Image (cartoon, helix red, strand yellow):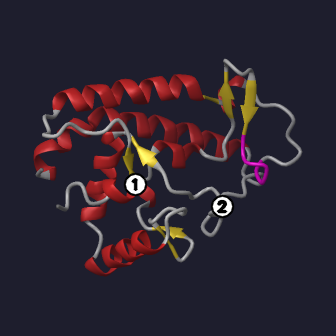
Amino acid sequence: MNPNQISHLFTNYQTLVKRVDSHIANIKKAFPDLIACKKGCDGCCKFLTLFPVEALTLSDAFAHLTEDMKIKVIRKIEKEKESCPLLIDRECVLYPARPIICRTHGYPIYMERQRRVDFCPENFKGITSFSKEMMLDIERLNTLLVMINRQFIESIETDPPFLERIPISEALLTLCS
């Protein structure tokens, strides 16, 4: 599969990523001293499975890494099964291309069905409530991601078809093989 032939299919996903990043930027601006997430803070960086649209976006970014860095990531895939293989020296080597869950983790999310707000306990210490504008409606976000992924899958023909979720270790090599 040639990345140049499918790059236009990432447009909807990239639009969603920009919206999420804008939301997170607003939170960081509103709470500049209450967010612990930064380089070296990697407790949430676990092995993930991804929707095909995210998997191929990540694979495209992986294809642009230096050969040296690709080898480090592949060695980590072979050795470690629980942590994210992109976490090298406590830093994400594909941070700009990270999946939606990595972009939102730690920030206030609202779960309507459970009537619950969640965020990393290291962030927002002393904050007891958030305005609606500061929270991500995770169910709505997931619905958008599922719809974007479905449209992406329908736009691309593969044999065999993509799995519903792709382990990150397999996702990285999708466009390289």
| Depth check, front residue: 143 or 39 | 143
Identify the residue position indicated by label 1 in the image: 168
Magenta-span inclusion, residue 24: no
**Left or right of 68 in this view: 168:** right
Query: Residue 38: image x %, image y %?
Result: 63, 62
Q: Main secondary structure of the magenta part?
A: loop
Identify the residue position indicated by label 2 in the image: 43
Marks 1 and 2, the one that precedes in the sequence: 2
Q: Is 138 rendered above or below residue 83?
A: above
Residue pictured at 48% horizontal, 51% vertical: 48
Q: Which residues are magenta?
A: 119-123
Residue pictured at 32% horizontal, 78% vertical: 71
Q: Outermost residue, bottom direction? A: 68
- Name the amino acid, label 1: Ile
**Left or right of 122 in this view: 47:** left
Query: Residue 113: image x %, image y %?
Result: 67, 18
